[in-house]
Image (cartoon, rainbow, N blue to C red):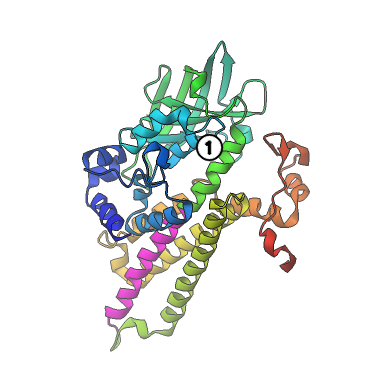
Amino acid sequence: MDHLKNAISLLKSNKDGLRCPKKWRSQYPTNVLATLDLPEVNGGLGLPLQEMIKVFRIAGEIDLTLRDAIGIGHASLLLEQSRGAESFADYLREVGGGNYFIGIAMTEPSAGSDIRSLETVGKNEHGQVVINGRKKYILRLMEATHFIVLFKCENTSSLSLAILPRDSEGISYKNIPKSAFPLQTFGEISFNNVKVGEQSLIGSWGGGMPIIVNHLTKWRILTTAALLGCASGALSLAIEWMRTREAFGGPIGRFSHLQQDVASYAGRIHMIWIFLSEIARSIDSGNEKYLESALCKAEGGDLAVQVVRWSVKTLGARGICEETDLMQRLLDLEAMTIADGASDLLRMQAARGLTGEEIYESGLSRSRTVNRVGGKALNYMLFPDAIDEY
């Protein structure tokens, strides 16, 4: 892992690289970071999830922005469908070579986590898909060469996914200023009769829901690893400050209130890391861990925010200075407790595995039979191996 940490650290020193992962990847002699989880058949290393979380943790410890430099990212959606990697082999090769960077467009002005309320619609006509609608709060707006778009199939409640080049006819972009992740662009994408061939569909027509669920399960695990890394980096700064900063005749680390907090936070980070590692191993073994990954991201993200906020206060005035980057970490973490599923909603999803599907569906004011993936009702159970404990 040391050589990977060195490679990621190089990216941190390159501000232009932080702004554009595609440019950074292409200008370095090796694209090893981009190919870590690319399948071997496509020229990558094919690392399993339980190894990838270690790399994402390193990236998060250095800078949360760097999670975009690790692996194939949202391009892994191209693997999550029945036709297999061969269908998108050219895309995957270009992603691995650093020439493509794939963004994802899901959120809309009136639909965030409630993807059933999407208003972007696709019509399948004569071998082409025609897409109309608007996406909002999309990260990597200008850096991405392609976008994977989630849309509703016309006159149905089914969802589909398609990959589009950013310069497709009928697509327009609008930047939205933000505070978090200042070196990444962010904004809106409008689709006005955008036409793509059926070969750009990821999976079958109307079969997007199980694909996106599977992707989010893994992506939230990787994201949580980066969040824990970010918290660990901040905690290391605070610990060093406790050892070296003197007040009232000695190092501040002797104060019991700081000792209590630092021990608690270090232990909680480690406990969530153990949980995270267990989920990753289980997913690698072919098990469904949608609810566990949701809970892990919620708890890991909120803990990371607490740790960094405490680290700022521990460092005092130095904690708000740019030299420590703690305030930027805090802003980025707050954003990440919303992105890829807000913490409160993720806990609500996890609770369905404890209280049951009917309670969950009634809380959303819909019948149990509405909630289906691939024609089968969801019957997830949280911690199935330990359910007798509750």
Quarter occupied by residue 183 = top left
Q: In front: 168, or 212?
A: 212
Taking the spot 59% from the left edge, 31% from the top edge, the residue there is 118
Indicate whether 377 appears above or below 50. Answer: above
In the visual, does 1 lie left or right of 348?
Answer: left
- The correct choice, above or below, for 97 with respect to 182 in the image is above
Question: Viewed as shown, does residue 235 lie left or right of 128?
Answer: left
Question: Which residue is at a point 48% across and 75% down the rendered structure image?
Answer: 264
Is residue 235 located in the magenta-colored stretch of the structure? yes
Q: Is residue 340 above or below residue 42?
A: below
**Disc 1 marks which residue?**
80
Where residue 26 sits: x, y (%)? 25, 38
Residue extent of the magenta highlight: 223-247
Q: Label 1: state its secondary structure.
A: loop
Residue 284 is covered by the magenta coloring? no
Identity of the amino acid at label 1? Glu
Image location of residue 328, percent across then percent down:
34, 55
Residue lying at the far top of the rendered structure: 126
